[in-house]
């Protein structure tokens, strides 16, 4: 959570810092700030409660310096306010720090520093770092040594960038559980918490490892460990396109990302389908057929939408490979002392690859000797690096807080995994061919759904002022209902509840009234009759029904119907989900919500 940027070079740092922060704003957006080491000495600082645009408006023209750091915040310690915004300074205003993560022993350190004379101006845990580093920097100590010494007293997670008014020819950055990436320019250097802030300036990057620090100067960098041992890091090249970080003519990133899905699904599938053997090739699994045959169970872990995508993945694995599979929130799994079995394959799902709960679950499994694969979008991310192997989504950067294209690509990746597993077990070549053909057809079928965007917008406007919405589906349709409800509540703030259609009569039917419309997933599969019966029960209680179906149910059963193209039954959930993304998007627009940056949320949850 939160975004960090830093610049050192011959140019004025401020324009880069502000632009970089705007690109990172999806990570947190309740306050923002910048600090530069002025050419005439001393630090200049501006920070405000609000968006990066508010910060840019507050930065005066004379706010210049060749070395600077910036931050956009998602509050954990202390309310969003000017005082709590980063950067934080020490009392002498010599050291400025921006920080992502949580300092767990902040209270204890604050008490000691206060006893030594430090005066705290914020409620944040971060401010202890500026006082602590300043205390260690006194007497001409090199900044990197002061930062190392200070971090040696800290318990917690951090990605930090530190600026020193007395050593403005360098910035020191450090990583422990919260990403920091260096960007290498021409006689200038950048650092950020996320490559999206850097791609306009350089494609050459170095991802710091946990426990690593770097001293960054205009002409290069040196990486080292907490005990001052130099490390040697080779830069890698970022292949994401700059226009992936623009709205590309769409009103919002979310709409753009929904419309990118035919292309992102093509990329997830690219080079992985094998028509000859009716299977999928997944080079990154690092598991051969013999090892895969020994797997007796699959446990999928993720948070939020990643968890729901995992539920669809579990369904696919059970259906195609006939291996018991189950998805669980990583945020719960990690706290319940889970039993780790040698013949279970654990799969961690994450768009960002940074979600702390998912990362902690992976670390717990590995500590107990389990084997973990990652299904991850962000190449080189913490979760991707922690796993034993995995599948990259190649969905491209997802900027909007609500996940859409990464969700769809995750399910496609699970379909590939299930196909691969299935063909090693008992899935017949004919069934394999059926799934391969259906996967190949998906991009065009998604386009067909997207063509209905305008009609769905009208429907969304009609229903947007409902007090709430019920989402129902059976078996394969239930995770679709859960993800549909998640999308609606997250961006429109309309209360939404998902239920298995089979469970309605065991309680929630009491809620049904004209004020609580139901979105029902009604695929044309072996459960169609059961689903139609449920629709009858809702209509008998004066409920309003929007069906998402392959063919329109009788008029007496539905008020509206969104038709989607038929795939193979196992893959139908993928297509049934797309209209729900559009429904949530258009409802949020109709209600005037901040679609890409919904209240209280941030894109990556890198804290507990
Ligand atoms: C999705 O719309 C949500 N913003 C959220 O549930 C998200 O999927 C979750 O926080 C997990 O993120 P990750 O995929 O980056 O790990």
Image: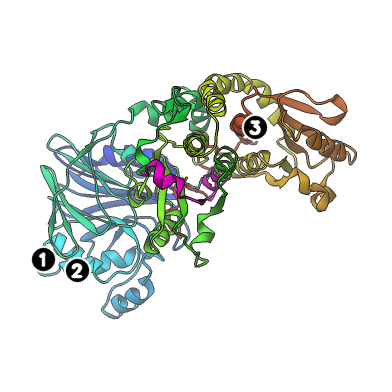
N-terminal of the two: label 2 or label 3? 2
Provide the secondary structure element on which disc 1 rests.
Answer: loop
Q: Position of 114 compared to 500: left or right?
A: left
Indicate yes or no: mark 2 CB to ligand 1 under 8 Å. Answer: no
Residue at 77% x, 32% y: name it: 528
Question: Which residue lies under the disc numbered 2?
Answer: 149
249 and 437: which is toward the camera: 437
Residue at 41% x, 66% y: name it: 123
Provide the secondary structure element on which disc 3 rests.
Answer: helix
Q: CA distance from mark 2 to mark 3?
A: 52 Å
| Vertical order, 262 against 138 (above or below) | above
Rendering coords of residue 124 (x, y %): 39, 64
Which residue lies most toward the right here?
A: 540
Do the residues under discs 2 and 3 have CB atoms within 8 angstroms? no
N-terminal of the two: label 3 or label 1? 1
Q: Position of 21 compared to 452: left or right?
A: left
N-terminal of the two: label 2 or label 1? 1
Residue 583 image label? 3
Provide the secondary structure element on which disc 2 rests.
Answer: helix
Q: Is residue 194 found inside the magenta-colored segment of the image?
A: no
- Region in magenta: 287-310
Residue at 34% x, 63% y: name it: 126
């Amino acid at each position: 959570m939160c975004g960090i940027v830093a610049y050192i070079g011959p140019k004025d740092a401020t324009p880069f810092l502000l632009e970089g922060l705007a690109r990172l704003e999806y990570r947190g957006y309740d306050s923002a700030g910048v600090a530069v080491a002025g050419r005439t000495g001393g630090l200049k600082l501006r920070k405000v409660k609000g968006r990066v645009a508010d910060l840019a408006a507050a930065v005066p023209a004379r706010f210049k310096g060749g070395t600077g750091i910036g931050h956009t915040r998602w509050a954990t310690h202390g309310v969003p306010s000017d005082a709590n915004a980063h950067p934080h300074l020490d009392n002498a205003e010599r050291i400025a720090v921006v920080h992502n993560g949580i300092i767990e022993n902040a209270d204890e350190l604050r008490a000691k520093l206060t006893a030594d004379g430090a005066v705290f101006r914020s409620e944040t845990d971060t401010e202890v770092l500026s006082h602590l580093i300043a205390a260690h920097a006194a007497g001409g100590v090199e900044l990197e040594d002061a930062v190392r010494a200070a971090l040696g007293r800290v318990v917690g997670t951090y990605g930090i960038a530190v600026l020193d008014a007395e050593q403005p020819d360098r910035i020191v950055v450090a990583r422990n559980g919260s990403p920091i990436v260096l960007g290498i320019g021409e006689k200038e250097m950048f650092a950020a918490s996320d490559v999206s802030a850097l791609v306009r300036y350089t494609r050459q990057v170095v991802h710091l490892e946990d426990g690593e620090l770097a001293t960054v100067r205009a002409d290069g960098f040196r990486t080292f460990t907490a005990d001052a041992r130099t490390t040697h890091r080779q830069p890698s090249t970022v292949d994401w396109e700059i226009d992936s970080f623009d709205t590309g003519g769409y009103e919002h990133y979310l709409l753009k990302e929904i419309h990118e899905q035919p292309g992102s699904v093509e990329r997830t599938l690219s080079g992985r389908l094998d028509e000859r053997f009716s299977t999928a090739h997944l080079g990154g699994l690092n598991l051969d057929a013999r090892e895969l045959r020994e797997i007796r169970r699959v446990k999928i872990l993720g948070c939020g939408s990643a968890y729901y995508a995992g539920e669809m993945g579990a369904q696919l694995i059970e259906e195609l490979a006939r291996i018991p599979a189950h998805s669980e929130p990583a945020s719960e799994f990690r706290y319940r002392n889970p039993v780790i079995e040698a013949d279970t394959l654990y799969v961690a799902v994450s768009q960002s690859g940074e979600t702390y709960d998912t990362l902690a679950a992976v670390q717990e499994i590995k500590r107990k000797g389990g084997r973990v694969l990652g299904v991850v979008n962000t190449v080189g991310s913490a979760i991707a690096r922690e796993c034993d192997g995995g599948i990259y989504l190649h969905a491209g950067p997802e900027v909007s807080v609500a996940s859409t294209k990464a969700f769809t690509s995750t399910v496609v990746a699970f379909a590939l995994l299930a196909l691969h597993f299935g063909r090693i077990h008992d899935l017949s070549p004919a069934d394999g061919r059926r799934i391969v053909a259906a996967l190949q057809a998906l991009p065009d079928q998604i386009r067909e759904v997207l063509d209905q965007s305008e009609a769905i917008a009208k429907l969304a406007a009609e229903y947007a002022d409902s007090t709430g919405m019920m989402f129902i589906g059976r078996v394969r349709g239930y995770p679709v209902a859960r993800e549909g409800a998640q999308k609606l509540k997250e961006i429109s703030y309309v209360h939404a509840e998902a239920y298995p259609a089979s469970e309605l009569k065991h309680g929630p039917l009491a809620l049904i009234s004209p004020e609580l419309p139901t979105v029902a997933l009604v695929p044309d599969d072996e459960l169609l009759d059961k689903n139609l019966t449920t629709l009858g029960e809702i209509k008998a209680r004066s409920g309003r029904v929007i069906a998402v179906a392959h063919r329109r149910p009788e008029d007496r059963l539905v008020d509206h119907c969104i038709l989607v193209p038929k795939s193979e039954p196992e893959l139908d959930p993928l297509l049934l989900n797309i209209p729900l993304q559009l429904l949530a998007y258009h409802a949020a627009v109709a209600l005037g919500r901040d679609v890409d940056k919904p209240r209280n949320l941030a894109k990556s949850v890198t804290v507990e």
